[in-house]
Amino acid sequence: MQSPCCYLLSLLLLSGTQANLEGTFTIRLLQTTTFQNTSFVETEGLGLLEDIELLSLDKQTWSIHFCRPWVRPALPRADWDTIENMIMIHLHEFNRVINAGAMQMDIPYPFVAQCRAGCVLYLNRTSQAFAYMGYNGQDFLSLNTKNVTWTLSQDTKFSRYVQSVLQNSTAFTEVVEIMFNETCVDEMKMFLQYGRAALERQEPPVATVFARTPSPEQLLLVCHVTGFYPRPISVAWLRDGQEVPPSPALTSSPILPNADLTYQLRSVLAVAPRDGHSYVCRVRHQSLGSRSLLIPWGNSEVVLIAGLTVGLLAAVAIAATLVLWVWRQRKHQQMEESESRTSILSEEA
Ligand SMILES: *[C@@H]1O[C@H](CO)[C@@H](O)[C@H](O)[C@H]1NC(C)=O
Ligand SMILES: *[C@@H]1O[C@H](CO)[C@@H](O)[C@H](O)[C@H]1NC(C)=O
Ligand SMILES: *[C@@H]1O[C@H](CO)[C@@H](O)[C@H](O)[C@H]1NC(C)=O
Ligand SMILES: *[C@@H]1O[C@H](CO)[C@@H](O)[C@H](O)[C@H]1NC(C)=O
Ligand SMILES: *[C@@H]1O[C@H](CO)[C@@H](O)[C@H](O)[C@H]1NC(C)=O
C-alpha cells in the first residue's frame, strides 16, 4: 500500500504523461506453460508495463528476474516477497489442475497453456482488470472481473473442467480479487513513478523512400520508417502536396518491434511509372514535436544521380557523363530499386 503523498505524485505524473501515452497504462503478466508430458512442465513468465519489460521468471527456480534497474526499488521488499510467493503457489496449482484435467479428459500431450492477466489504468482514474487463459494458442477461458466468474471461450469438456475447478477454488478467487482489484493498480502507480524516464523515452524515426518495379506498368513507392519510440506514428503519402487518401493502392505493414525497443513499419504506394506527379512520404511522431519528416521520392535527375553515385562510385570518379549514360540506359530497362535520401524537416503551420 502507498501513502497519500505517493498517490498525489502518481496523479501528477499521470497528467504529465497524458499526451505521450494515449491516456492509458496497462500492466500485463504473461505466462506460457508447455506440458511435455504428465511429469515434465516448462514455464516462461514475463511482466510488462505498456511495452516495457519489467520482470521475467527464471525457468528453473520460478524466481523473479528484474529487467530494469528501477523495477525492484519501486516496491518494498516485502511486496516482492509476497508476489514471488503468489507466483510460486499459482504455478504449482496451475500445473496440478491442468495436468489433472488433461489426464482425466484424455488431452493429448504435449500442449501449451497460456495465461494473460493484468490491469488497465484509465486517465479518468478508473481501472479494469483482465485475465485470459489460452490452450494451444486459442482462447480458452476469460475472467469476468465484476463477479469473478470464468466464461468459456471454447466449449469443450476440458474447458468446462478447468472452469469448474477455478470457480470452486475460493482461494483462487480471493487472490484474483486482491491481485487485480487493488494491488495491480497500486503497483502500477509506483512503476509509473519510478519508470518515468523509460515511459517518456523518445526516439525519432529514420525514414527512407525507395521504389520497386514488380511489373512494367507498376511502380511501388516504399517508405520505410524505423527506430522510433513510442509506438504511435503517422505515415502518409503526399501526391503533389496533397495527402493520398486510403485506397487499395495504399498499404501499410503492421508496426513491428526492433530488438532495441524501437519500432518500424513500411507504407507502400502503388503508382503508374512516370505519371508526372511528385510523391513525398510524410512522417509525424511525437519525438518530432509539431514538425514532420518529409522524404521526397526522387524523380528529379539530381536525386537520381546522387542515388547512383553510391552504387557506381568508381564510374563517377572516371567520368560523370558515363554515369548519366548508365542512368539513361537503366531508366529504360526498369529501375529495380533506387533510393532517395533527401529528407527535410518541415515546420507545420
Ligand atoms: C517427459 O519429457 C521429458 C523431456 O522431454 C523426458 O525427459 C521424460 O523422460 C518424459 N517423461 C515421461 C514420463 O514420459
Ligand atoms: C473511464 O475511461 C474508460 C476508457 O475510456 C471508460 O471505458 C470508462 O467508462 C470511464 N469511466 C468513467 C467512470 O468515466
Ligand atoms: C458474470 O458476469 C458475466 C458478464 O459480465 C455474465 O455473463 C455472467 O452471467 C455473470 N455470472 C454470474 C454467475 O453472475
Ligand atoms: C465444483 O463444484 C460443483 C458444485 O459445488 C461440483 O458439482 C463440481 O464437481 C465441482 N468441480 C470440480 C472440478 O471440483
Ligand atoms: C473492487 O474494488 C471496488 C472499489 O475499489 C469495489 O467496489 C468492488 O466491489 C471490488 N471488486 C471486487 C471483485 O473485489
Image (spheres, rainbow, N blue to C red):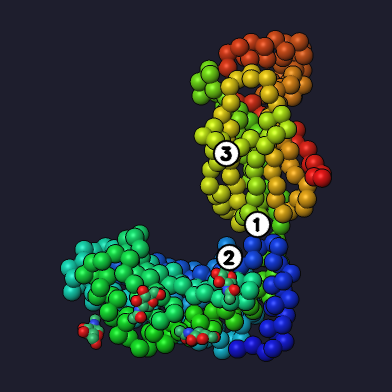
Q: Residue shown at 34%/60% (left/top)?
A: 138
Quarter the N terminus occupies: bottom right
Q: Earlier in the sequence, mark 3 or mark 1?
A: 1
> Residue 21, percent across and down?
65, 63
Residue 227 can be seen in this image: no
Dot 3 falls on a residue whose secondary structure is loop
Circle number at residue 50:
2
Circle number at residue 220:
none
Check disc 1 and give the amino acid type. Answer: Pro
Circle number at residue 246:
3
Check disc 3 and give the amino acid type. Answer: Pro
Looking at this view, is 266 or 42 the one in front? Answer: 266
Residue receiving disc 1:
230
Check disc 2 and give the amino acid type. Answer: Glu
Dot 1 falls on a residue whose secondary structure is loop
> Residue 278, percent across and down?
70, 26
Task: Give the Cα separation between the discs numbered 2 and 3.
Answer: 29 Å
Residue 184 can be seen in this image: yes
Counting other residues with Cα less than 10 Å from the Cα at mark 3, is it few (<14), some (14-19), or many (20 or more)? few
Q: Earlier in the sequence, mark 2 or mark 3?
A: 2
Answer with left or right where residue 263 lies relative to residue 105: right
Whether tag 1 and tag 2 are in contact, CB under 8 A, the answer is: yes
> Residue 107, percent across and down?
21, 66
Mark 2 CB lies closer than 8 A to ligand 2: no
